[in-house]
Image: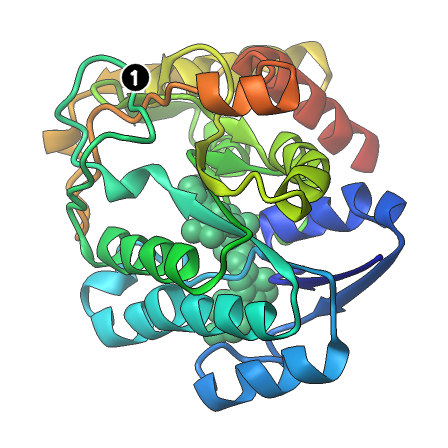
Amino acid sequence: MKILLLGSGGQVGQELQRTLTRHGELVCLSRQELDLTQLDRVAEVVGLLQPQVVINAAAYTAVDKAETEPELAHSINGVAPGLLAEAAQQVSAAVIHLSTDYVFNGTKNTPYEETDTTDPLGSYGHSKRAGEVAVLQANDRAIVLRTAWVYGAAPSAKNFVKTMLRVGPERGLVKVVMDQVGAPTWAYDIAAAISDLVAPVQAGQGGLYHFASSGVASWFDVAIATFEEAQTLGLIEALPEVVPIPTSEYPLPAQRPAYSVFSCQKISQLLGRRPPYWRQSLRKMLAELAAQT
Ligand SMILES: NC(=O)c1ccc[n+]([C@@H]2O[C@H](COP(=O)([O-])OP(=O)(O)OC[C@H]3O[C@@H](n4cnc5c(N)ncnc54)[C@H](OP(=O)(O)O)[C@@H]3O)[C@@H](O)[C@H]2O)c1
């Protein structure tokens, strides 16, 4: 089987390079090889490569910058995925596309279901929601997998966990938001789930699915856990002090949902297993980081 992977250099994309190889031929395209702002090239490239499955891990992910570049975010996240899904349909390929918890406004206090109404708070969320709709409309064998709070160990990966490991030891004290809750999700776990979705998507079990770690945490909890696990693994010497603060004390250009917890019942049924507990995966990711150093 031939799988075409876009965004292979990103956090999830790099892990997909580890998990997808078992399916046969994996063709990875970097941004240089297919820039999703070049909308007219999308169909041409897919037509040339003739894959059986297209996996889109590429996205404009600069959530705050998207507030000042809404057109660019919309083009990459909202328009290009639809064209990709349409091009895949033309060559009878199924599609797996990634989306985000930022399609919700976060005002619920029970886990978000796939059937819940979307209401993005910012440009990034709006652009990702447009992409979801476009993909599901354009291809009758498409999975849109929403995930949340992604972190990975790849050297180029930019995420909260790696930021904590950098600034914690530097400053000795970090202030971290305690009134946004979700589930930090290891890029490897997402990639493992996507690899297991290849057969179901080809069999026509498409649709919208939520995938995030099991359990719930605030960013404050994640910071504490990161430092504790990192110390145990010898990644840091002393535990930095972590001070809980409200979101109002850490203003950013884009508003984030306060509550980002997913119900993962639907994906658990499809995969026959629940997503791993967030702290167990965090420990595994940090062990990988420790092995890199
Ligand atoms: N990060 C999170 O916390 C989070 C949360 C929920 C959902 N998601 C979703 O999960 C997916 C993967 O996220 P991630 O964290 O792995 O993202 P990431 O690390 O930022 O990687 C994004 C990838 O997209 C590529 N890309 C950006 N603009 C492009 C363009 N114009 N043309 C082609 N490729 C382009 C990047 O290429 P370069 O390497 O050249 O920059 C990079 O390989 C995305 O759909 C994202 O929306 C992420």
Q: Amino acid at mark 1?
A: Pro
Residue position marked by numbered label 1 in the rendering = 111
Which quarter of the figure is the N terminus placed in?
A: bottom right
Q: How many marks?
A: 1
Which quarter of the figure is the C terminus placed in?
A: top right
Q: Quadrant of residue 229?
A: top right
Q: Nearer the viewer, residue 61 or 41?
A: 41
Image x and y of residue 265, in percent = 46, 16
Residue at (73% x, 18% y) in the render: 234
Image x and y of residue 224, in percent = 45, 13
Residue at (49% x, 29% y) in the render: 211
Name above or below for residue 48 compared with residue 230: below
Q: Nearer the viewer, residue 122 or 27?
A: 27
Image x and y of residue 23, in percent = 85, 47
Q: Nearer the viewer, residue 149 or 1?
A: 1
Q: Quadrant of residue 44?
A: bottom right
Left or right of residue 137: residue 202: right
Badge 1: how crowded within 10 Å, few (<14), some, or many (20+)? Answer: some
Left or right of residue 84: residue 15: right
Left or right of residue 67: residue 262: right
Name above or below for residue 173 compared with residue 125: above
Image x and y of residue 77, in percent = 38, 64
Residue at (40% x, 71% y) in the render: 76
Residue 169 in sight in this render = no
Residue 238 in sight in this render = yes
Element assignment for label 1: loop
